[in-house]
Amino acid sequence: MNTISQPVHVTLEEPLFLGLAPYLRMNINGTNLLQVAQHLLSLAEHDNSDANVLMNLSTTMFCLQQKALGLAIQSQALELRSVFHLAASQQPAKLRLLMLVVPGDLSANMPLDCLLENSDVDLVYYYVDSCAPLAFPVPDHDALIVAISESDENRALIVKLDQALAHWPKPVINSPRNIQNTDRNQASILLQNVQGLLMPPTVRSTRQALLDIVEGKMKLNDLFEGCDFPIILRPVGSHAGRDLEKIAHAEEIRTYMTRVADTDFFLSKFIDYSGKDGLFRKFRIALIDGNAYACHMAVSSDWMVHYVNAGMYEDASKRAEELAFMNQFDDFSRHHKVALDTIYKRSKLDYVCIDCAETREGELLIFEIDHAMVVHAMDTETLFPYKQAHMLKVKDAFRDYLFRLTNHQVVNN
């Protein structure tokens, strides 16, 4: 495909399943999602048997940070049915992709519809049952993708799916057994001893072990050999920086524990990846069938970089840096070829995203690898006129991979 389609016009009066993309686009563009949620709520009150409306309402609640309410509404929808069809924007669709998903908030599954927004690929969301996955009649499809995030809760289900999909008659993207490679501890083990790549070892710790360090009953080195403060601490299962903090000394762990009630945590050594100007730069890269594509770059004065609060929307000089990064990404990917190729080969994932940076020594510093990161082309062209062309490369690469995999003819519209 060699053109960018215009954003889909969302008609909320229609009881269609809309996925995440329209609501994310509205959120980015400043639409009042509370009003959207109120409208959907009125539709649900009029007909509480419409699973599409309930699922759309659930998504808006997640976008509004109302997780408990979103999960309750989602549960109502799933009591009605377990399959939801997101029709391709370009009809007739040329390919149907079955997504295996699980109940949960926006971090529970791949937000693949954001990448395939305005495409000619039908998406079928199949909410699998943890007791008997694939027990219901499986919808017709050309290929299947395991879109479930790695987590403690999903581990047993993923093992069952691996058995169920062992001899699947259609192509399977991201085999279940490889999903575990996105676990922070597992990824840090896989990605050691790679030329030009740095991923600090990540260990898992209990709350009690961390409190023992505070009380002097054990030392950090006893828990994590060769590690010293400062460290990075986060709860197991947290996403988007939730309760992620840099800890400078043991006493700060005590303060952290008064705010965070989780029982299990990941910790790793803090690496100062700031540039000579003191700013931190984080890249998001997609690996599609082993080929690397730039998704975005954020520049921030804070070590914990998030695109939405890094000042990218307010600072033209930061956007100019992102433009330069995207324009010169071929040079970047050649420089880090060994590291990127190794991530693909060792993760064994057909589609995976990487959040990373460059150290002062020029190594590729890996923060996380995950197939469930958000990749989209929704930022306004007024501020980001360069993004559409670069994100088109990512969209087309994934679409073309699907078509090669299924032996469909690739048609560039």
Image (cartoon, rainbow, N blue to C red):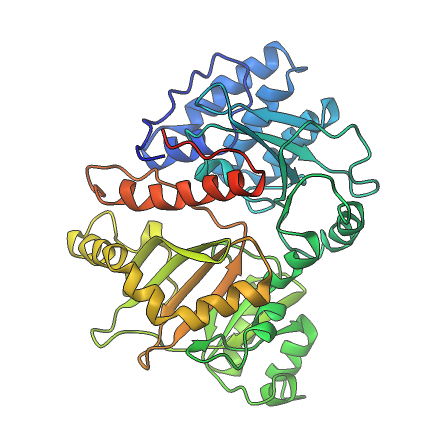
User: For residue 179, which quarter of the picture?
Assistant: bottom right
Asked whether the viewer can see residue 3, the reply is yes
**Residue at 41% across / 78% down in the picture?**
196
As displayed, is residue 50 above or below residue 119? Answer: above
User: For residue 51, which quarter of the picture?
Assistant: top right
Residue 185 horizontal side relative to residue 90, left or right: right
Provide residue 374's location: percent of width, then percent of height: 46, 46
Asked whether the viewer can see residue 111, the reply is no
Label count reads: 0
Provide residue 200's location: percent of width, then percent of height: 50, 77
As displayed, is residue 87 above or below residue 129? Answer: above
User: For residue 131, which quarter of the picture?
Assistant: top right
* Residue nearest the viewer, comparing 26 with 261: 26
Where's the N terminus, which quadrant?
top left
Provide residue 238's location: percent of width, then percent of height: 57, 57
**Residue at 66% across / 55% down in the picture?**
151
**Residue at 32% across / 26% down in the picture?**
6
**Residue at 60% across / 21% down in the picture?**
52
Where's the C terminus, which quadrant?
top left
Provide residue 162's location: percent of width, then percent of height: 75, 51
As displayed, is residue 207 above or below residue 103? Answer: below
